[in-house]
Amino acid sequence: MKKLLLVRHAKAVHDTSYSDFERPLKPSGIKDAEFMCEKLLREGIKPQILVTSPALRTAATADIFSEFLSLPKPREDERIYEASRLTMMNVISGFEDKYNFIGLIGHNPTIEDITYYLTNQMPQFSTCSVALIEFDFDEWGAISSGTGKLKWFGSPD
């Protein structure tokens, strides 16, 4: 069985002096990420590794999750930034099968879109929302439309 934790990055500044890629987290975003990590720990939800977009706000969110959940340094995958559904499916299907539970930190609208594509359910992903999806497969490459079950959803709101 494979499990995927989809995370939308925490709240970031909307200051025009930053490029979209370089927008840092707001202090409230940092608090939201810490809050969601505490929620995950209480629920016993802990992926083996994290894969993140290299954009500053997602990488910073991933670093917080990594620290709070005592995980290895997050792996960056540049394809996640501005990913289409097809690109995101290529990222997921390319995960190493030795990992059964992977956390992926990315951006909307792709995180909502891929959740719907995989589960046929559409939770509203405010910033730093988290969805746990389970699949009855032993290979990441077998995952496709409607094959996942949304097992848990949480939001800092």
Image (cartoon, rainbow, N blue to C red):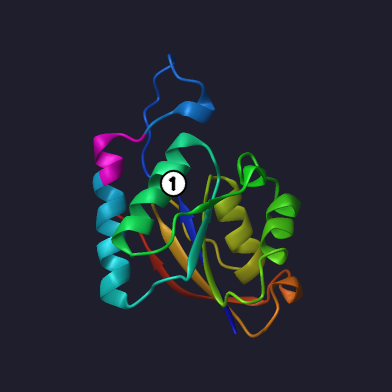
Residue at 54% in and 40% down: 54
Q: Is residue 41 magenta?
A: no
Q: Name the side, left or right, on which 147 lies relative to 99.
A: right
Counting from the top left corner in percent of width and height, residue 10 is at: 38, 45
Most extreme residue toward the front is 72
Magenta: main secondary structure equals helix
Asked if residue 129 is positioned above or below residue 80 in the image, the reply reads: below
Q: Amino acid at mark 1?
A: His
In the foreground, 54 or 85: 54
Q: Is residue 135 visible?
A: yes
Q: Name the side, left or right, on which 143 lies relative to 17.
A: right
Residue at 30% in and 34% down: 26
Counting from the top left corner in percent of width and height, residue 139 is at: 70, 78
Asked if residue 136 is positioned above or below residue 85 in the image, the reply reads: below
Which image quarter: residue 156?
Answer: bottom left
Which image quarter: residue 73?
Answer: bottom left
Q: What are the residue bounds of the magenta stretch?
A: 25-30
Q: Which residue is mark 1?
A: 9
Q: Is residue 29 magenta?
A: yes
Binning the other alpha carbons within 10 Å of mark 1 as few (below 14), some (14 to 19) or many (20 upward) gives many
Asked if residue 143 is positioned above or below residue 17 in the image, the reply reads: below
Position of the N terminus by quadrant: bottom right
Q: Number of callouts in the render? A: 1
Residue at 49% in and 65% down: 49
Counting from the top left corner in percent of width and height, residue 32 is at: 28, 49
Residue at 62% in and 75% down: 148
In the foreground, 54 or 36: 54
Q: Name the side, left or right, on which 72 lies relative to 107.
A: left
Counting from the top left corner in percent of width and height, residue 103 is at: 50, 63
